[in-house]
Amino acid sequence: MNLSEATQQLQALIKSFPNPEQIPSSELRTTYQLFIDTLTDHNHLYYINAKPIISDAEYDELFAYLKAIEEYFPTIISSTSPTQGLVGQLSDGFKKAEHLVPLLSLENSYNAEDLRERAVRIAKIAEKTGKLTWMYHLEPKFDGLSVEFIYQEGHFIQAITRGDGKIGEDITTNVKMITDFPKKISSPGKLHFRGEILMPKSQFLKLNQAREKAEQSPFSNTRNAAAGSIKLLDSGEVAKRGLKIVIYEQLAGEIQDFEQLGLPVFNLPQKWRNSNDIEQIISWCQDFELKQYLDEQDLDFDGLVIKVSDDKEKQLSTGSFPENSVGDSLFTIQTPPDPSSLKNAKATQNIRSLLGSTEHHPRWAIAYKFPAQQIASQILSIDFQVGRTGIITPVANIEPVSLSGAMISRVSLHNFDFIQNKQIKSGDFVWVQRSGEVIPYIVAVIKERRTGREEPILPPLFCPACSSPICNVDIHYYCSNPKCPAQIREKIVHFASRDAMDISGIGEAIIETLVQQKMLTSVADLYQLTKIENQILMRKFPSFAEKKISELVLQLEASKKRPLWRVLNAIGFPNIGKKTAQDLANYLASKKVHSLNELLKAFADEEIKMLYGIGEKIVQGIQLFISSPETLKLLYDLEAAGVNFDATKTEKKESGFSKGIFSLTGTFPISRGELIAQMGKQGYQYEEQPNSSTQRMLIGEKAGAKAEKAKKLGIPCYEERKIIVQEFGLSTDLPTSSVQKQILQGGLF
């Protein structure tokens, strides 16, 4: 069971047993442990990775239920429970800060072939300019927390976590607690560096021993320990954690020698550092002596980084400059140069500016990841999942195992060719590893452990979701029913996802319910949910509270204004992801496409094949896709619903609300969503919970505990309807239709 499935299972359990005393005694301990494991994983995503996959409200519901279990059954309380203390908790004091230069990730490689393919791509671009020589530089890949460090006139002034690459958290105060990090250097001007906050292995061992003595859950690895420690509320405690900082990149400012400045660096020995031969670099990456050298250090490394620089830099004795620093344009190119301009480029142009960067990673650097940890487990059973295109994917349910800090119980088998090539059977013991430290992957079958009771894994004859016949095309098996509820569900999940239409008010559980109730039979049906009669119908379903419905309607209305690239990514064009969708949208904007008909015409034009990075295969896929009657109906239905197809309309960034932050509680004459929307139009920003930054509190009838909390915080409170209307300039027009009256009588608050 993956984290998403575990979360949904626990949410369903809460609905079935609102009171923990109702949980069957035979299931109590298993359920309790599942809550601990699930919330611990969510804490990791939120506090350490800063990539939560559930809302705060959903998390709070799970956390509150876990606390309730412990209140009813105190004898089963475990020291590993998140209720006993959160690791690396963030405080309200951590401000957001913007990076001057995006802190990009690195593209990962796991074998020699990946590195050779990258070298070929580099050569193709470089040779077009006449640049025939360049160097590869090898550096260690630290397993810590990536941070930007800023100095002004020699004084350390700010530290910002990587965050989403553009905006991170200001952790300056805590970084100042790291004793051996220089707070002053002898260099004028403003300098921006990138480095890693790390916890030495020796310190990690001491910390975990202390935590175990205090009956606290130990950290799973040094990275989590470092990330959790630097974000502690108590800066004094940070000073005791023994954290280290290593600087490895200059982002902006006059090029500096890190070692001369006294900045902490870690360079590989010279014999493993520079080469103009990719085969030499590959041999170093696979060199047991180098791996052993890194293992002997007191820091953790999870791989190596290969960076490309101009050949003239080969004599440099440190990895700190200039290949790790910003030149005039090293970090400003986000897309490859136009091929025609490359032909006329000077051969002396910097190799890195020629290669450029994607939104995710620079093309002049790649990480070589060390082989992941492997562990043995047994395949217990096989499930068949139906994807949004109808592809049937076999999934192995395995005996749960802990792998690289996560509990693994399900592993994708990809397709039936994969099963045949690996000779996998149900009941087999297999070696499992986490590919890229994220996705579980079956490496091989342990044939020596076979008993003869294993069974072959055969393709199903009928769809597991709708019982329609299965058809076979190449290596894949498909459900033949375009109206299969599983396909519809997955298409809608993709459409609403963060990199598509970003509709945060609707999750997989809600979509599943609405598909089962036949309220959603296509992606376009999402926008029918905004109708009053459909809102009333949804209120009949479990967990569809008025508050959730009104917030969903608000999100759906907002999504209609999303930029075209999101629409293109959401619809599900074959072989089109976020980046390609953005490139296509930019192209369509240059063609002044303002409507769906103009978009279809532009996609049919042969000129689109000339777009850089869009191959003929992708164009053919687009043209075949839009020729389908089903696709055309979907597109026109979306346009009729008000979804944006104007390529010239770009995504507007929120500039902040000048009038301040407000919260609310209780019942009002109009719905919660409408009230929040009206306040937003007046320039106010809504927050669910009142806190020290809240400037106004609206209190309606039957107000809850939030009202008392606001008063204790000294937040100005507005309790009378007349005062609220006058103070905030809200509309006094109330809904009057019969359907709207029904909603009001139920009270959407």
Image (cartoon, rainbow, N blue to C red):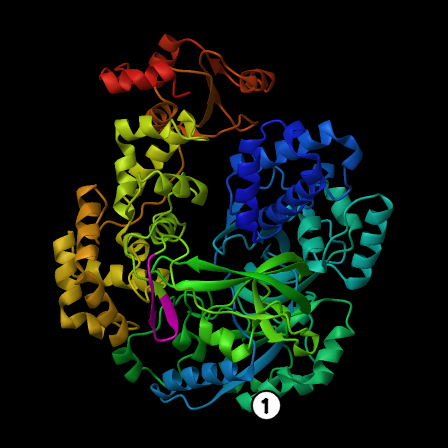
7 over 115 or under it: above or below: above
631 over 365 or under it: above or below: above
Q: Quadrant of residue 481?
A: bottom left
Q: Is residue 704 visible?
A: yes
What kind of secondary structure does the magenta stretch mostly adopt? strand
Residue sitting nearer the eye, 315 or 382: 382
Q: Is residue 171 visible?
A: no
Residue 261 point in image, percent of width and height: 67, 66
Residue sitting nearer the eye, 49 or 158: 49
Q: Residue at coordinates 59% horizontally, 30% vertically from top-left?
A: 17
Residue 730 point in image, percent of width and height: 31, 18
Dot 1 falls on a residue whose secondary structure is: helix
Residue 530 point in image, percent of width and height: 28, 33
Q: Which amino acid is tagged 1? A: Gln
Residue 82 shown in magenta: no
Q: Quadrant of residue 448?
A: bottom right
Residue sitting nearer the eye, 563 or 575: 575
Please give the residue where the numbered disc 1 appears in the rendered image. 280
Given the current orientation, which residue lies at the most extreme front position? 453
Given the current orientation, which residue lies at the most extreme right position? 213
Instruction: Say whether residue 693 is left or right of residue 40.
Output: left
Q: How many marks?
A: 1
- Residue stretch in magenta: 468-477
